[in-house]
Amino acid sequence: MGTVANGYRAGANTFPFIDIKGNVRAVQVKQFDEQNHTTGTDFLHSIIEKHHTRNNKPLPEWLEAYTKQDKRISCLFGEHLLSKYHSNPVALVEAPKTAVYGTLYFGLPETPESLIWLAVYNKSSFSFDKLKVLQGRFVYVFPDLSKDGNTFKEWETKAKEYESRLPSTRFIFSDLLEQKATPLQREQGTDIADVLILRDWRDFRKQPIQKQPPQLEPEKVTKVTKVTHQQNIIFSHVEPLPKVEVFKTERIEQPQNWSNDIAELENYFASIDLPTQPVKLNRCSTITDCSLFIESHFATVKANNGKRTFLPYLNRLQELKQVLTINSN
C-alpha cells in the first residue's frame, strides 16, 4: 500500500492487486473521509493516462497495451500472500479496505490455522476465475450488506457451484451482518470493517480464535447446514455471537489414522534432494520454498493426525510427492 503525493488524488490510498506469482495486475486508488467512507475511486493507470493526455504526451507502450486488456483486476487483493502461507485458511471479503482492517485486527498468520484476509474487489468479482487460486483451502466469506440480502444469496449460490469444481475447497459463510443489521446499515452497504472499527483491535489479539471441533466420522452433506453461533471461529468473542452457514457438496473419505501415510512421505522426502527452485504444485499453486512447505505441513498433519479438517495438508504433501516423482523421470 501507499499514498498519492501530488495531483488531484493527493492523499489517496493505493491498493495494489498482486497475483500469486508476484505480478502487479492493478493499483486501485481510493480516498476516504474521517469516518473511512469512500469519497473517490480511481486507478493508477488511469491517473497516468490522464496526465499524459493533459500534457499532450504519447502514452508509454506498456500503458497502451495495458488499457486494451479486457480484465485489469484479474486477481484477488492480497493473493500474493498465498505463496507465502501455503495452506492457511482464508477470510474473503469484498473490498481491499476491509481485508486491510481484518489483517490489522487479527494480524498476519502466525500458525497454519491463522487467517489470510483477501478481497475480491467488488460484488461482481466473486468469480470462478479469481477464486480458483484458493483450491484446497477453507474460505470464510463475509459479504457486504445489501438492501435485500442479494449479495449474500448470490455469493452463496456461486460458492456451491465452485466447490464442485475445486476439490478439497470449502466456502463457509458468516451471516453476522445479515442477522444483526439495521435497515440503515443495509441501505449503506455496511461491511465487516465498519463493525471492526468500532472495537479496540487489541481485544482481538488477546483472545485466540476458536477451532471448530473436528468431526471424526466422514459424512455427506447435500444441503446447507446451520452451525450454531458457538462454533463461529471468527467472532467467537463478540456478543451476541452470530451463526455461520456451512455447506459441503461432496464426500471426503478420511482415514482414521494417517501414521502410515506420514511415515511413507517422510521416508520419500528424506531420500531425495529437494528442489531449490519454485515448484508448480497444480495450476493454482506454486511452492516457492519446498523445505519450508514440507516442514510446516508435516508439523500440521502430525499435530492433527486423523482430523478431517486438516486432510488437505496431507493431500498436498502427497500431491508434491507425485509432482517431484514425475519431474525426476
Image: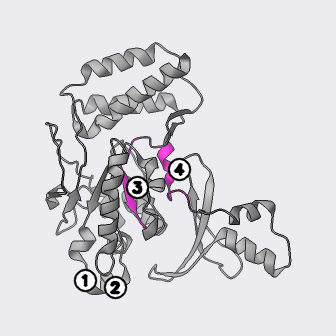
Asked whether 255 falls inside the magenta stretch, the response is no
Which mark is drawn over residue 182? 1
Which of the two labelled residues, at mark 4 and mark 3, occupies the earlier sequence position?
Answer: 4
Check disc 1 and report its element: helix, strand or loop.
Answer: loop
| Nearest the eye: 113 or 227 | 227
Check disc 4 and report its element: helix, strand or loop.
Answer: helix
| Type of the residue with mark 1 | Thr
**CA gap, disc 3 and disc 2:** 30 Å
Asked whether 75 falls inside the magenta stretch, the response is yes
Which of the two labelled residues, at mark 3 and mark 1, occupies the earlier sequence position?
Answer: 3
Query: Is 171 drawn above or below residue 303 in the view shown?
Result: below
Q: Residues within 10 Å of mark 2 (few under 14, many from 20)?
A: few
- Circles 2, 4 touching at the beta carbon (< 8 Å): no
Which mark is drawn over residue 107? 3
The span shown in magenta is 73-94
**CA gap, disc 2 and disc 1:** 9 Å
Check disc 2 and report its element: helix, strand or loop.
Answer: helix
| Type of the residue with mark 2 | Glu
Name the residue beneath numbered marker 4: 80
| Type of the residue with mark 4 | His
**CA gap, disc 3 and disc 1:** 29 Å
Camera-nearest label, 2 or 4: 2
